Amino acid sequence: MARRQQRYRRTVGVVVAAGVVGCFCLGSAGCTRSDAVAGGAPAGDPVRVLHGAADALVAAGSSKARTSLEMVTGGTRVTIRGEGVYDYRKRLGRLRVLLPQEPAGESVRRRTLVELLAPGALFMKNRGAGVPADKWVRVDTGTLSDGNLVTGGATDPFAAAEVLRGTREATFVGRTEVAGTRVRHYRGTADLAAAAQDASDANRGPLAAAAEGFATAEVPFDAYLDDQGRIRKVRHRFSFVNGENGGGDKPVAVASTTLLYDFGAPADVRLPEGEDIYAGRIAEE
């Protein structure tokens, strides 16, 4: 049991602090009804449509978001879920991220992080590891080898959209529904290096870092766009090498799912003041 708990803490530490499904449903609202073609034609060339998905979000202004990350390492399945809002014009977001329960049993309380997403920075509250409860931890996303695509246990919704700017090939699968909204389902592969070249200033550096830091820059994805070209759901499959997982240099697959809804919802995100940011050393958990 002690070894199992130690392996679990290492896994969560990789995902949440060190940079770390197929079809993962974010509750009943996030499940697609069917992947079968249900009529309707694609709105233009799939690659071109996906390249413009991030711009469609900027035009929408803001939305609510749900996220999940799922990975299996050392025989342990870890799922981290988040929920919040995002302002695509200001590139600011706020998520409440629920960490997975430790394997000790139901008596162990699941910790919730509050995360603020901003250009070049990730702020985390309730980080633990000796950080005062009323303080924020600031992480410079430019230093992260994964470009903050998985570090905080959630993929930044706008970064998830900008990954699609690197779409190399894609096919139109068909019409379906996400949370009651008719969408077009596309499946393809994006290249992180190409995405970095066409990304916004805020995401250009992080995506370039991810292209170098992941096991491969090729990212398979499934994207579901509404008739306005806005992402309603996108699922990426990232691959990274975790030397602490007992598998040596064997890549570990991480599935990231982002669900966007309620476009135009208020997204007032205020970043912490300097005195509210923890400046001390963060212990390993």
Image (spheres, rainbow, N blue to C red):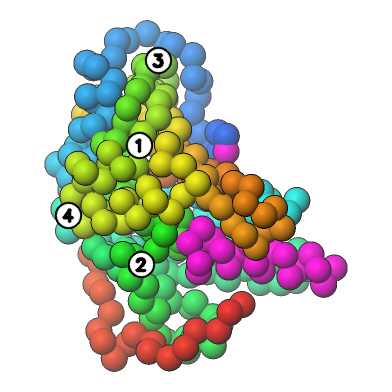
Q: Which residue lies furthest to the right in this view?
A: 1
- Distance, label 2 to label 4, CA atoms, is 16 Å
Residue located at (48% from left, 78% from top): 126
Circle 3 is placed at which residue position? 174
Kindly tell me whether residue 239 is visible in this rendering.
yes
- Magenta span: 1-21
Residue 12 magenta-highlighted: yes
Residue located at (43% from left, 37% from top): 219
Quarter-of-image position of residue 60: top left
Circle 4 is placed at which residue position? 201
- Distance, label 3 to label 4, CA atoms, is 33 Å
* Residue neighbourhood size for the residue with mark 4, other residues' Cα within 10 Å, grouped as few (<14), some (14–19), many (≥20): few
Residue 190 in the image: x percent, y percent?
A: 36, 34
Q: Specify which label sits upstream in the sequence, 1 or 4.
A: 1
Residue located at (19% from left, 41% from top): 198
- Distance, label 3 to label 2, CA atoms, is 39 Å
Residue 146 in the image: x percent, y percent?
A: 42, 56
> Please, what is the three-letter code of the amino acid marked with disc 1?
Asp
Circle 2 is placed at which residue position? 143
Apparent side of residue 176 relative to residue 200 in the rendered image (left or right): right
Say which element carries label 3: strand
